[in-house]
Image (spheres, helix red, strand yellow):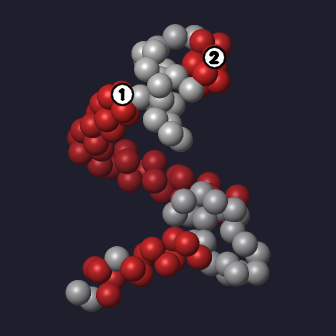
């Protein structure tokens, strides 16, 4: 990958950071490089489960201390999410999963 200034220009143009293809919506990479990056990340996670667990724990602590949802990182609503560490969207999705319903 190139320099920081080049990356900034690519992002501003809506182009992939590795090539000149258009980036996917909401991403900084094209479809090919997004897929490649996710595959590499999955391999790393399988080879380094303890490091991944430690990174997730650090992320959890950081988000909790900053007053963010520990699941998605969004700002917690002081009224709706009082005393909780997850936002209403994450709580709704958590209990929608079949394994949490005892199925």
Disc 1 residue crowd, few under 14, some 14–19, many 20+, Cα 10 Å: some
Q: Hey, which residue is sitting farthest bottom in the picture?
A: 102
Q: Quadrant of the C terminus?
A: bottom left
- Residue at the outermost right position: 78
Residue corresponding to mark 2: 9
Relative to residue 43, is residue 29 drawn left or right? Answer: right
Q: Residue 4 location, x and y as percent?
A: 61, 16
Task: Give the spatial CA distance, label 1 vs label 2.
Answer: 18 Å
Going from N to C along the chain, the mark reached first, 1 or 2, is 2
For image coordinates 64% across by 24% down, the residue present is 12
Report x, y in % for residue 60. 54, 59
At horizontal 27% and vertical 89% (from top left) the residue drawn is 102
Mark 2, other Cα within 10 Å: few <14 / some 14–19 / many ≥20: few
Q: Tag count in the figure?
A: 2
Q: Is residue 94 above or below residue 38?
A: below
Whether residue 67 is situated above or below residue 33 in the rendered picture: below
Q: Which mark is residue 84?
A: none
- Left/right placement of residue 82 relative to residue 48 reads right
- Location of residue 20 in the rendering, given as x and y in whole percent from the top left corner: 46, 15
Instruction: Please give the residue where the numbered disc 1 appears in the rendered image.
Output: 33
Q: Residue at x 67, y 78 (%)?
A: 81
Q: Quick check: can you spot residue 48?
A: no
For image coordinates 33% across by 49% down, the residue present is 50
Secondary structure beneath label 1: helix
Viewer-nearest residue: 20 or 33? 20
Q: Quadrant of residue 98?
A: bottom left
Q: Nearer the viewer, residue 19 or 46?
A: 19
Do we see residue 14 in this rendering? yes
Q: Secondary structure at mark 2?
A: helix
Q: Are marks 1 and 2 in contact (CB under 8 Å)?
A: no
Q: Is residue 14 above or below residue 47?
A: above
Q: On the image, which quarter does residue 93 sit in?
A: bottom left
């Amino acid at each position: 990958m190139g320099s920081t200034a080049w990356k900034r220009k690519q992002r501003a143009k809506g182009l992939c950071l590795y090539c000149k293809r258009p980036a996917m919506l909401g991403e900084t990479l094209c479809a090919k490089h997004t897929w490649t990056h996710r595959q590499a990340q999955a391999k790393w996670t399988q080879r380094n489960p303890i490091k991944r667990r430690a990174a997730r724990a650090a992320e959890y602590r950081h988000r909790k201390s900053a007053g963010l949802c520990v699941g998605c990182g969004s700002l917690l609503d002081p009224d709706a999410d009082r005393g909780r560490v997850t936002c209403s969207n994450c709580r709704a999705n958590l209990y929608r999963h079949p394994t949490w319903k005892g199925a």
